[in-house]
Image (spheres, helix red, strand yellow):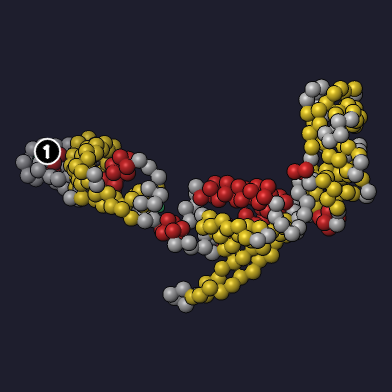
Amino acid sequence: MFCVKCGKDCEEQINGLCMECFLNGRKLMVLPHHVDLQRCTNCEEYNIRDHWTKMSEDDAVQEAALTGLAVIPEAQVVSVGTMAQPQDERTYEVKVEADLDINGYMVQAEGSTLVRVKNNVCKRCSRQLGNYYEATMQIRSGEKELSDGLRDEVVRRIRDSVEQQAKTNRQLFITKVQQVPGGVDIMLSSISLARSLTKDLVESYGAESKESASLVGQSSDGIDIYRLTYLVRFPAYHTGDVLEYKGKPYKLTGLNKTGGKLLSLIDFRETSVRKSEIQDLKVLVKYDDRKEALVLSRSGNEIQVMHPTNYSTVELRIPQDAEPVEGGNVSVVQVEEELYYLP
Ligand SMILES: [Zn+2]
Ligand SMILES: [Zn+2]
């Protein structure tokens, strides 16, 4: 084999040329004069190859420069190095060095481009700033008012869950949390998000839910647009409350879709009950209304405590595995005149 240009014998050829003649004066790598890098002024994320990503400006600038990189078809990029030098507040000069593989030969190429940082607003932020929402969860209670404690607990649970899910889906967010008479309304960016959060509340708290849709308009291509409302009604009882079951006090220890578990405050045995049964039980003491009592002494399954309101000494039964210690505090509830240890 010989080179068609210089006539030299050569083992490898590209398009009939020896490597020397092929490389001679050839531009191996091209970078555009400039690349515009979009930055969201609200969440401060950068758009790289149509994806909004959280990263430092320095990294974003170097990534952006590489989006414009092109090499001749005969070459494969083995590795690239970049260095960004600020020109002014919004412009960087980025030098790019690349190791290229051409038919097994390693060749270096270099170039530079300007990266201009442009202010923009990403789609999620523009929706969020525009109060966009697809669904509302109306959190209410079976009682007259949703207690502050339960309201805060539910709002926190929803915030945590949305934050977690938003890590993999940027379109999920809470538009608004609004206190209303009787409870709280939570506006959400997605119907499926609201549906899954509602399902979670039904399963974890034994809440009841009702779904309704309302037509809010039509899209530009004539498709009806609906907003969904999920009414989530919490039962009057909550895990931890003491309920009256068959005339005796029980602590509600767990709830699920179909029912719950009750723990006897007399012999500390657990019983499963259906949802329809729980709904008819009377709440004797709310969990938030439990009291603390000082332990004076313990012998076996009994402790002596100081009554939290009249300071008399009272003997209480405790479960086998309970660990109250003398001088410590235990939770107790008072039902009529009787004091009970609350596990
Ligand atoms: Zn040649
Ligand atoms: Zn944004």
Q: Mark 1 highlights which residue? A: 20
Apparent side of residue 308 relative to residue 204 in the rendered image (left or right): right
Q: Secondary structure at mark 1?
A: helix
Regarding residue 170, the answer to whether it shows in the image is yes
User: Residue 175 location in percent, x, y?
Assistant: 51, 58
Image quarter of residue 269: top right
Instruction: Out of 263 and 103, give the one closest to the viewer.
Output: 263
**Residue sitting at 22 percent across and 46 percent down?**
91
* Residue type, label 1: Glu
User: Residue 162 location in percent, x, y?
Assistant: 55, 50
Instruction: Out of 107 and 145, give the one closest to the viewer.
Output: 145
Give the quadrant of the N terminus.
top left
Farthest residue toward the front?
310
Apparent side of residue 46 relative to residue 135 in the rendered image (left or right): left
Is the residue 1 above or below the residue 328 in the image? below
Farthest residue toward the left?
6
Q: Is mark 1 within 8 Å of ligand 1?
A: yes
Few, some or many residues within 10 Å of mark 1 (<14, 14–19, 20+): few
